[in-house]
Amino acid sequence: GTFDHLLLRDIVGPEVLHFDTYQLVERAKRYSDAECAGDLAKLREVVKVNARATPTQLLETVKLHKALKSMVDEYSLDAVNVKCQYELSKMYGHTPCVALSWLSDAGTVSTCEGDIPLSATMLILNLLTGQPIYYGDVIDVDSDGLLLSSCGFMPFSLSEGYDPEDPCDPIVEIHPFKHKGFNGLLTSATLKPGRLTFARLVEGRGNYEMILGVADGVTAPLRQGIFPAVGIKLGSGDRMDAFIRNLVSQHYAVAYGDILHELKLLVKMLGIEATVI
């Protein structure tokens, strides 16, 4: 997505550094298979590996993760956003979904598809809660809620049944994509239910707005049997109508817990209009 770099910095605050995808790819290529063995063993401790995932795909995922982590460390980044479509998913031939999910659990806000206003939203939610932040696409809408599902990104610790005291009992499974157009591995798990806050920064003409609300997150089946998903229950047709009327993007960020009060205070301090669903 396009955005105004200076407007974002002036109104919301973050400084955005742009790195060409070529830099990420070249960093990933630096790592030998032997250098990735330890990281691959750590990944296998916290996720299940689907039988269709090849050794090459697993190594590519580790290399992308190591490359992203090195850039985070070198440039002191609080968040990363990767232009996966189509630079990585087709041209390079390997998506960063699992690498970003893994990085997010380690404390770096992570997302993809070049959606910078979404990344800024996720960073705000992360700073207010101290937790990994999920985002998903608005997929299905019904009378009282919607399905939020990403195409392969999900912090491992947000999966239903995840036990922080026993992270070596994997709940999350990593899969290859099943359809043409995407190459690589994705994170496959159902998100945990619970009270949650959803939000989205929206760039206008010389200003910003935030769409936000609190809802109940409910267990939802994996989309197409593999993609992460969570149901968002708004509880009434009026709230759903309001959500649809204000739908300005398919991407919404999600944090567990009710932080509506804190977000309303923040946007007031920033001089940003808030639309509460």
Image: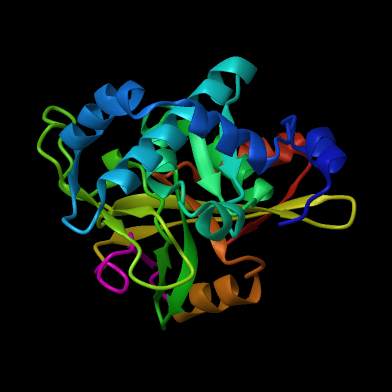
Question: What count of labels does the image hold?
Answer: 0
Quadrant where the N terminus lies? bottom right
Q: Is residue 200 left or right of residue 34?
A: right
Please name whichever residue, 175 or 257, is drawn nearer the observer in this view of the structure.
Answer: 175
Specify the color scheme. Answer: rainbow
Q: Nearer the viewer, residue 72 or 127?
A: 72
Task: Name the chief secondary structure element in magenta.
Answer: loop
Image position, residue 7 (x, y; %): 85, 42
Q: x, y (%) of residue 121?
A: 60, 44
Q: Is residue 227 above or below residue 105?
A: below
52 with respect to 253 (left or right): left
Q: Image check: 230 left or right of 19?
A: left
Q: Which portion, as a residue range, is magenta?
A: 221-236
Which residue is most to the right? 206
**Residue 84 falls inside the magenta stretch:** no
Is 226 above or below relative to 209?
below
Q: Residue at x 33, y 51 (%)?
A: 195
Question: Which percent across, then down, holds residue 113?
Answer: 59, 54
- Pinpoint residue 104: horizontal percent, then vertical percent: 42, 35
Q: Magenta stretch: residue 231 in it?
A: yes
Asked if residue 108 shows in the view, the reply is no
Placement of the C terminus among the 4 image quadrants: bottom right
Locate residue 183 relative to residue 260 in the image: left or right.
Answer: left
Q: Residue at x 60, y 16 (%)?
A: 74
